[in-house]
Amino acid sequence: MPMADPFCEETRQVVIQAAKNLSFDVYDRDSGEPEPKHPCVHTKGSLVTINGPRFSTRFESKVFRSWGLDLVGMTLVPEVSLAREAGLSYASLAIVTDYDCWKADEAHVSVDIVLREFAKSIDKVKKVVLEAVRLIGARDWTKTIEANQLLVQNSRQDLAHAKDTDK
């Protein structure tokens, strides 16, 4: 299954538009604009998934940062892969809660910090999800669904192997 672009671009754009419709600040790193100092919706980022439930070691945190990754999380994989294999239009809406443990002048990540910061954001996230659902319902997804189905069909290794053995 191709995973170069793991998320459905149409669904991503719907989530971004939902945030814009709600007048949330939206930041696109490709715009050339400086990154805002205040919390905002980022249109894209790079995430590494670690096995949880645990937080990164200081070494892991520094390595991930040196790789240019934006986020460290414990979810998204295997969900994104399974959604792709099922032909689903999948996007992610991540809530950033902390700096992990690489930043010396910030409190290191803890369950209390994560839950507190998550609670601060959850009402906004609910609004974005509800607006995204409204936008999804107002859109014709026929071409996207057909493209997803074709991708799944053309990526089935069992069928590719069967075709090779039939020769």
Image (tube, rainbow, N blue to C red):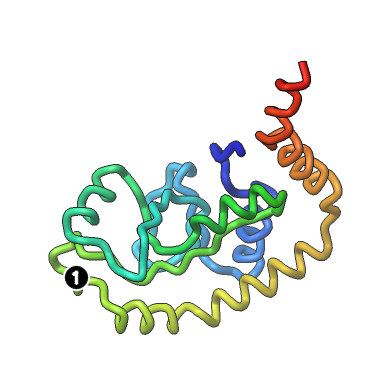
Horizontal side, residue 79 vs residue 130: left or right: left
Along the viewing direction, whichever of 9 and 79 lies nearer the viewer = 79
Pick the quarter of the image with the C terminus.
top right
Vertical arrangement, residue 58 with respect to residue 108, above or below: above
Which residue does the image show at 39% across and 62% down from the upper left? 73
Mark 1 sits on what residue?
A: 106
Residue 81: horizontal and vertical position, in percent?
A: 57, 50
Residue 138: horizontal and vertical position, in percent?
A: 83, 63
Direction top: furthest residue? 167
* SS state under label 1: loop
* Picture quadrant where residue 156 is located: top right
Vertical arrangement, residue 57 with respect to residue 7, above or below: below
Residue 166: horizontal and vertical position, in percent?
A: 78, 21
Along the viewing direction, whichever of 95 and 157 lies nearer the viewer = 157
Amino acid found under the numbered disc labelled 1: Glu
Horizontal side, residue 103 vs residue 1: left or right: left
Residue 37: horizontal and vertical position, in percent?
A: 34, 63
Along the viewing direction, whichever of 166 and 12 lies nearer the viewer = 166
Horizontal side, residue 105 vs residue 99: left or right: left
Along the viewing direction, whichever of 113 and 26 lies nearer the viewer = 113
Which residue does the image show at 57% across and 54% down from the upper left? 80
Direction left: furthest residue? 104
How many numbered dots are placed on residues in this image? 1
Horizontal side, residue 165 vs residue 110: left or right: right
Pick the quarter of the image with the N terminus.
top right
Query: Mark 1 Cα within 10 Å, few/some/many (few <14, many 20+)?
Result: few
Which residue does the image show at 13% across and 64% down from the upper left? 104
